[in-house]
Amino acid sequence: MMDGLLSPAEWEAVRLSLTVAARAVGCGLPLAVLTAWLLARFRFPGRGALDALVHLPLVLPPVVTGWLLLLVFGVRGPIGALLLAWFGVRLAFTTAGASLACGVMSFPLMVRAVRLSLDAVDPGLEQAARTLGAGRWDRLASITLPLAAPGILVGAIIAYAASLGEFGAVITFAANIPGATRTLPLAIYSALESPGGEAEAARLALVSVTLAMAGLLLSEWAGRALRRRLGH
């Protein structure tokens, strides 16, 4: 049905967006959970700086974030040059680079959702497990993370939906390459820049709105379902 509504190029942009967003969340979520746990449970030198760095993409223009990624992960950047020389991996202007840009932009959303969920976990339960001999990692795996699961799931879904709509960081770091980095927002932009592309832009915008609404509704439903299951 979708193939009949969209052209092959439009459908490719949709599929690429879904793939890029999935990779961004799949790679970023474990690090987001670890970061949120550190910020919520520990006091250490530089904690404020780490907190500010994590949330920096929320306040920076996305184009600036993409430019910073280009400086660091470009072929002449300190990390990008090493990746290319040692492993033959190039991130700038690739599908992987688009996923990295989306992951960086959505990372603060995941951290905030997970951290709020961790803050809601009763510390007495963790303390009780500690008195029974459970180690730090045992408490994390058996008590903290299961109780924080609603926030983790909601954070992942919201980050996925946000990644589907990311534009500035992607076009700056990964460019607008058909079949490689032209995600849904970039395809809409390209259609609007082309003579007579209003109809294509309208179709893609409708798909974008549908996916965004589906993501928001799914996050709300999933959060409530998990909270009911956990007895919250």
Image: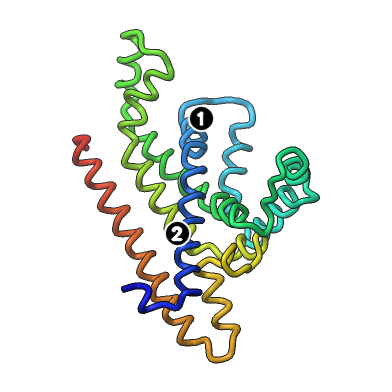
Q: Looking at the picture, how far across and down is residue 76, in whole percent?
A: 80, 50
Mark 2 = which residue? 18
Question: Mark 2: which amino acid?
Answer: Leu
Mark 1 = which residue? 38
Q: SS class of the residue under badge 1?
A: helix
Q: Residue furthest right?
A: 76
Image quarter hosting the C terminus: top left
Q: Looking at the picture, how far across and down is residue 98, in whole percent?
A: 59, 57
Q: Are marks 2 and 1 in contact (CB under 8 Å)?
A: no
Q: Looking at the picture, how far across and down is residue 217, in whole percent?
A: 29, 59
Q: Looking at the picture, how far across and down is residue 52, in whole percent?
A: 60, 43
Q: Nearer the viewer, residue 131 or 9?
A: 9
Residue 212, label in figure: none
Q: For this view, does 28 lie left or right of residue 230?
A: right
Image quarter hosting the N terminus: bottom left
Q: Answer above or below: position of 187 versus 168.
A: below
Q: SS class of the residue under badge 2?
A: helix
Q: For this view, does 194 lie left or right of residue 34?
A: right
Q: Answer above or below: position of 2 versus 115.
A: below
Report if residue 58 is visible in the image. no
Q: Residue at x 48, y 55 (%)?
A: 21
Label 1 environment density (alpha carbons within 10 Å; few <14, some 14–19, many ≥20): some
Q: Nearer the viewer, residue 60 or 14?
A: 14
Q: For this view, does 122 lie left or right of residue 106?
A: left
Q: Of the residues under marks 2 and 1, which one precedes in the sequence? A: 2
Q: Residue at x 19, y 35 (%)?
A: 231
